[in-house]
Image (tube, rainbow, N blue to C red):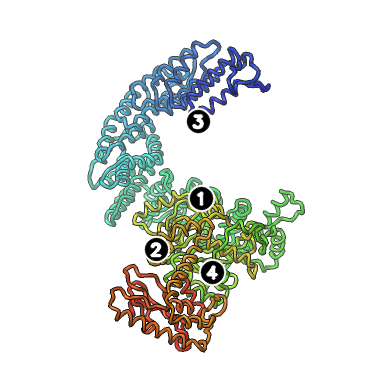
Amino acid sequence: MQGGSLVTVNDFETLIHQCRKRKWKEDVAVIIDAMRALVAKGWQPSGDEGSEGEPLPPQPQLQLTSKTYVSIVDAYLCCGDEPLAWQVVQEIDALPGINRELPLYRKFVRGAYLLSNCDHIAELITLAHEDNIIFTQRMGVEIARMFGYRHEEGFEILINHLPVGETGAKAKKQGFLEELVKSCAYKNNSVGAEESVQAMLKYGFSRSAATETALFMCCIQNDTVSDAQAMLQHFQNSLLMMPVPVYDSLLREFYFKYTRRGNTFDESSRKVAMKTLYARRAIFEQVFKDRETLEAEDKFAIDAGSDQDSASFRYWCSRASLSCSPLMFSQHAMQVLTTSRDKDSKNAAEQSIRDALMTTPDPCLFLLQSVVSLRFLDLTFRTLGKLAKQLLVVVTDELPMKEQHAEYCVSQLPLLSVHIVKELDDVVCLHRSHRSELLAFCLDALETDSVDKTMGFLMRRPELYDAETAAYLGPKFAEMFVYGGVSNVLMFFKSDTDESLGMRRRFVREVIELENAAAEEDEIDDGLPSFRNTYKAIREFKLEHEAEFMPYMMQARAAMPKPVYADASATPADDAMYLKIPLEQDNILVVDNDETLSFATELLMRDSVTRLGLDAEWRPDSRAAVPSKCSILQVACDDYVFIFDFVEMALGDLEELFEHLFASERIAKIGFAIDGDIKRLRWSFPETKCFDTFVNVLDFSFETLEATTHLSDGSIIATRCSDNAAASERLQRRKRRQKGLSTYIKQALGYPLSKLQQKSDWERRPLTPQQVAYAALDAYCLLMLQDAVTGNEHLSDLAVGDEHPADVTPGRRAQAAQAGRAAGQRVAAREALHGRAHAHHGAGARGLAQLRHAAHPAQVAQPVPHAPRRQEELPAHGHRVLGHGRHGVRHGLHGRQGGGHGEPAQPQGLGGLYVQVGARRLPPAPDGGELMCCCCCCCSHSSNLDGFIVNGSSPVAFKFAAKKSIFLVPFLGWVSRWGFDFVAIDRSHR
């Protein structure tokens, strides 16, 4: 205002509205006081800090209006303070120029209704009479609903005091009283509901379907079916409800289906029953249409007994001329058929239905009418079809359908769903007698009903599935395909018949015509449509090589936006800012031939593999007509990353390995939004089974980690859980992270992932080194993420002497997490351990020091996983070195056996030799024994761990040794004899 802006009452009313939204009740009074102060005396600076500027004169334009008081009352009611809102309403009397208008009354009634507080409604109505206010229909309904617990006071207000005007006053009050009765029923005030209906009759109002429904609701407030039936009979004897057996049928159905374990009909049961009752409201409406006829006859007696159902069926069949009888018959039939739990009771129910139908003048017609009336029961389509089928088989085997029956079915087609029509056609054969009417129904059903069910109905009938039908429905199918994007209409033309090829061609021509017309309407610049849908249909029908359609294929391809791929050889500008993979380049293998596949299979099939990082890549397809297939699958274990190349390798060669890895519960599959990768793999290779089941999946894209199993049908269940229902509910409540993998990696490891290669062309060969590095890190970072986030301990086998793993792991782990290289932690710790072991044994290596230095450098083989495995010749001095080693071991063992000084000593002087030839010394066993392996017998002398004998020149053997940190016995000359790199000694087969 000091700046010259025009401020009005609307601005302050907006402030009041904001207080209403935020439930700031106290601030409403502050705003009102500020408005009154500005109107009366303006604003003067007080001299305090923050109170600066020119003074403002009084602002008369900010005088409170009737609309302002509406906002105030609304705000207080929204804040839950009904007494304060009522106080404001009363204060208006003392304010000159302010009138209580209809919006004020409407806001107060609405707020009081939402608060279920009717304390001041009677006084409000008195003020309304003084102000000559007429309440609206909605206000009357809300007032009636507030008095469910105080029905007598509510009835008095609705009958004598509610200002509803003169026009249609009785009809309005009839509706308000019905709402009062329903409010009593909802609030379990059965006495109030009964007394309100009796009072309605006393004052000249009538019962209705609404009062019938309300009193029935009172019945299901009872805990047992017998009490509910007793209350129903009381209402019927009191002439407050119709004396028909259908109400008893509903009660028995509800209490049978919704009673919980322990034979209790609790609030949860009642809630489901109320929902079902609302869906069946047509029963009460249809019964009341024939009220006069039904009440003129003798009351139906509800007698408990085995013949009760038969009596109910006969009751409605004897009144087959009434419009409500088929629906009531259907309700009884549904109740009996769906509550029969054994074959005998089901057969008895069908027999009672058959016997009752035979008493009607035309059993087939009444049965068809009952099936058609199933639509009023608001059931699922599947349930409708099932019930229709069960009813139709009752008499159709005995009685033939005639022409008048088919005519009746045709007359009802516009009202029916395709699920019921299918069952009717099975017995009436409309596809033969009324083909054109049935096709017209299907044409409408394609818009209003299930497309798949409609197509299935046509395709399963040879008389309908022909070129004539395709020509009739083809334009509609093409319209749905082009304009609606309904791709599954193509399935209609994929069945293999003599006319299928012609039907497909005709459909494609329809699509071409529509796309040409669409291009003309859109006024495309070059005048050439893209034929995107035509291209899809031609490819789906495999017509791309036909001369008629080849020009459209070429034009569609030319119109496709050219994909833009990222530079496959690009590197980040500041490479140091991004996470690096803590593996040597030799440990990243592209599996694109039999040799690398053999190595990957050998390593991944071992029991030591307990977790895998998974990721998949495919060519970007955002602008493509069809999705891209997976190009590579990255599988990362602790020390290797294998990039399986689907472009170069046949999936059949990989299927056995993948099936083992993905179906194994022992191996954790770690991913980020891995469900998308699994779906893409299944879509890319639908014929293979290895991607059907993924067991023990951990998905870091969710805020909570839980092992899940991805089944072939797309469902996801908990891997290890005894309570499947609880697990399913828990999985559905899982929340996905708001940010992607790179952001999560940065939070956990300190460095983000570079996504420079994400949009590159993954189908181009060969893959660039940058693509290989990106793909490897995308999978391996998941293992690093698990190490950093879940606190996995990978150093538990590295204790040396008195140093416990708990003393080693935290420091190394924090350092690894900070650097973003959690997996490197294991390698660094292992190298430090072996260094300490080497130093410890080197001090006593007097007798064998010269032998250690004499070992040729070629003995320490460097692993080259990309190269084919080959066996090197034993060096000339190898036998001499091995002989001295055996002699030293025998000497050490002899000393251990004959020393007699308690704990045997480790053979001295062997540590250096072990290091030179590639062997590894185990740490002390937890039980105090030494984990040694004897060079003489090749057996482990401890029950804690098995030993190995290895070919000392094998890269694979020493890779395995480095991975396992296991004690190995080198034997340099045996490969030519046995042809293996190493042999494990199994504990159970020593």
Mark closest to the chain's N terminus, 2 or 3: 3
From the image, tell me which residue sits under label 4: 642
From the image, tell me which residue sits under label 1: 737
- Observer-side mark, 4 or 3, equals 4
Residue at position x 57%, y 75% in the image? 866
In this rendered view, identify the residue nearer to me: 384 or 982. 982
Image coords of residue 182 (percent x, y): 37, 31
From the image, tell me which residue sits under label 2: 803
Residue at position x 31%, y 38% in the image? 220
User: Can residue 411 be seen by looking at this rendering?
Assistant: yes
Name the residue type under label 2: Glu
Mark closest to the chain's N terminus, 3 or 1: 3
* Disc 2: CA contacts within 10 A as few (<14), some (14-19) or many (>=20): few
> Label 4's element?
strand
Mark closest to the chain's N terminus, 4 or 1: 4
Name the residue type under label 3: Arg
Image coords of residue 514 (percent x, y): 67, 54
Report, in whole angstroms, how far the alpha carbon at label 4 lies from the one at label 3.
56 Å
Mark closest to the chain's N terminus, 2 or 4: 4
Name the residue type under label 4: Phe
Mark closest to the chain's N terminus, 4 or 3: 3
In this rendered view, identify the residue nearer to me: 527 or 12. 12
From the image, tell me which residue sits under label 3: 22
The single residue placed furthest to the right in the displayed view is: 526
> Label 1's element?
loop
Report, in whole angstroms, how far the alpha carbon at label 4 lies from the one at label 1.
28 Å
Image coords of residue 841 (percent x, y): 43, 74
* Disc 4: CA contacts within 10 A as few (<14), some (14-19) or many (>=20): many
Q: Quadrant of residue 848?
A: bottom left
In this rendered view, identify the residue nearer to me: 820 or 43. 820
- Contact flag, marks 4 and 3 (Cβ < 8 Å): no
* Disc 1: CA contacts within 10 A as few (<14), some (14-19) or many (>=20): some
